[in-house]
Image: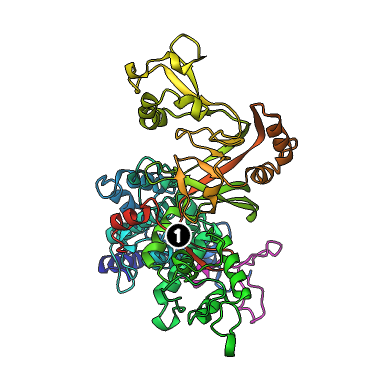
Amino acid sequence: MRTPILRSLAASLLVSVAWTLPIRAQDAVPEPQTPEIAKPAETESPSPGASPGLSDKPAATAATEAPDAAPTETKPTVADATPPAPDPLPPALETALKDTDAFGKADHTALVGFYAERQFAPLWIKDGKFDGAARAVIRRLENADAYGLDPIRYVLPDLDVGLSGTADPATLANAELVLTVAAMQFAADAQGGIFDPATLGKFMTAAPVRPERKAVIEGLGKADDKVAYLESFNPQHPAFAALKQLLADLRTRTTEETPPEIPDGKSLKPGMSDERVPVLRARLGLPAVTGEGERDYDDATVEAVKAFQENASLDVDGVIGPQTRAALNGGSDITVADVLVNMERWRWVPREMGTHHVWVNIPEYRLRVITDGTVEFGTRVIVGTSENQTPVFSDEIEYVDVNPYWNVPRSIATKEMMPEIRRDPDFFARRGLEVIYTGGGRDMVIDPRSVDWGLWNPENMPFRFRQPPGNANALGRVKFMFPNKHDVYLHDTPTRNLFSRSARAFSHGCVRVDKPVEFADALLSREEQLNGQRIKHLIGGGENGSLPMKRHVPVHLTYFTVWVDDAGETQKRADIYDYDARMKAAMNLGS
């Protein structure tokens, strides 16, 4: 709808043009001429089929009007004389962006750069209202909770701006910019998360990467499907998609749809008869047994339980104790908050994990070697205690150390060993440790009995301790190195009995591997000259040596307490480092 001023101006222009134009209708569209035929001075009125190039007027009149018939110039029409009104939105956008306080500094910088490059042409608004793409994006951001994000973080404009009447340019400009900022924020949250991992302490050193804001809106400008483009900033791993589906299921699940739990009670052992056995079979997906053996914990059910325990890194004994029962209940106690914090931690994992990589899930006490999305190898691991946590971060395994020395970390030497050293002169001999003097310009092995340990301050003493290679070495016979600030790595261990435990948080932070030679085979599958057999041969030789890898392999030390396994079963593990609880509290998620 035009304004009254514009209607008045148009009317005046029409009147003015009409008075200045020739009165003949033919002048608006000149007739074609026939140059070979000379015009006669006078002629009778032509018949209806006469040539249009001949005049039907008296000579005097024809002479007067002859210039009008010339095809050399087309006179402007009324429409030509009315220029289109300029779009008022680009100037309004330029004006709005001069307000440096309207948006955050990073947002403002991105907005100015993006819109200036396109001469302040709008991205979302067409014909005075949001286009279809804008409306679809607004609806997606309103439902950001489907991706585990809080919709309240995204300030959105009125979806129907300009629909109920003509909106002024300033209002449209504001709606345009508000939506662009919301889209940038969603992309940043979807990729990098909304929680700062560093607040969980020094062991949580995951480094999420947020996209550059101007690049986000430049991508939006090029994207045919803007909703799909924004959704692509979420983790693309199938495990994240499975959690997203689990979240949707939990939000819609009714009490009747919740699968039955195995009731609590005394441990259920093979050969027993118990009313919980039918529920146990149902949880395992086994056929129901009717009649006399319905309650018998028979061999077939025991074997199914053992297979479940192996997959769940539990004690493989066929006994349904508290931990196995909790795991078998399939996460029936999993809450929306549980899923949300685990979805958030997925945003801290590198988007490119490597086609061939090592995956350690700390709460699961398990390591996997994954190639092209397929698990090639898996084994149990031992991780750090709650006081000496295994850190969460990603790196690359660079070399394998065979028959390693164990260089005792200073923290262990000063806090754990020194009190015992002062009490026991035979401590070093009993533990098989060497003392290295570091204060003489070069390191040298000395006799520990030559030192009066009571005279030295453990914090600055010029000694370090190490354990030579051997069967008793704390690192076992092989370690897998990815140099990092935490000084942690994957390694063998002489203490094998701990791997039979269901909860295995016993180390000082390093990850102990149950089957190191088999792990080496899977890890080095892309190396030409390195493999598990060669490492086994070198171990037998007893000499220490480092074997560099031509292809470094990404390793991810992660922390997931809830996931959906390859069989589609929901899994939950104990929050051994209290990360879930602290994240829920900080994010106001409840329990």
Where residue 448 sits: x, y (%)? 46, 18
Q: Alpha-carbon neighbours of circle 1 within 10 Å: few (<14), some, or many (≥20)?
A: some
- Say which residue label 1 marks: 573
Direction bottom: furthest residue:
291
Q: Main secondary structure of the magenta part?
A: loop
Where residue 24 sits: x, y (%)? 48, 71
In-front residue for pair 90/216: 216
Q: Quadrant of residue 172?
A: bottom left
Residue 34 part of the magenta-drawn span: yes
In-front residue for pair 2/72: 2
Magenta residues span: 24-52
- Number of numbered discs on residues: 1
155 horizontally vs 463: left or right: left
Which quadrant does the C terminus fall into? bottom left
Q: Residue at x 75, y 35 (%)?
A: 529
In-front residue for pair 350/424: 424
Kindly state the secondary structure of the residue where label 1 is placed.
Answer: loop
Q: Quadrant of residue 141?
A: bottom left
Residue 56 part of the magenta-drawn span: no
121 horizontally vs 37: left or right: left
Where residue 215 sits: x, y (%)? 46, 47
Viewer can see residue 70: no
Amino acid identity at mark 1: Arg
Which quadrant does the N terminus fall into? bottom left
Q: Quadrant of residue 342?
A: bottom left
Q: Residue at x 56, y 74 (%)?
A: 284
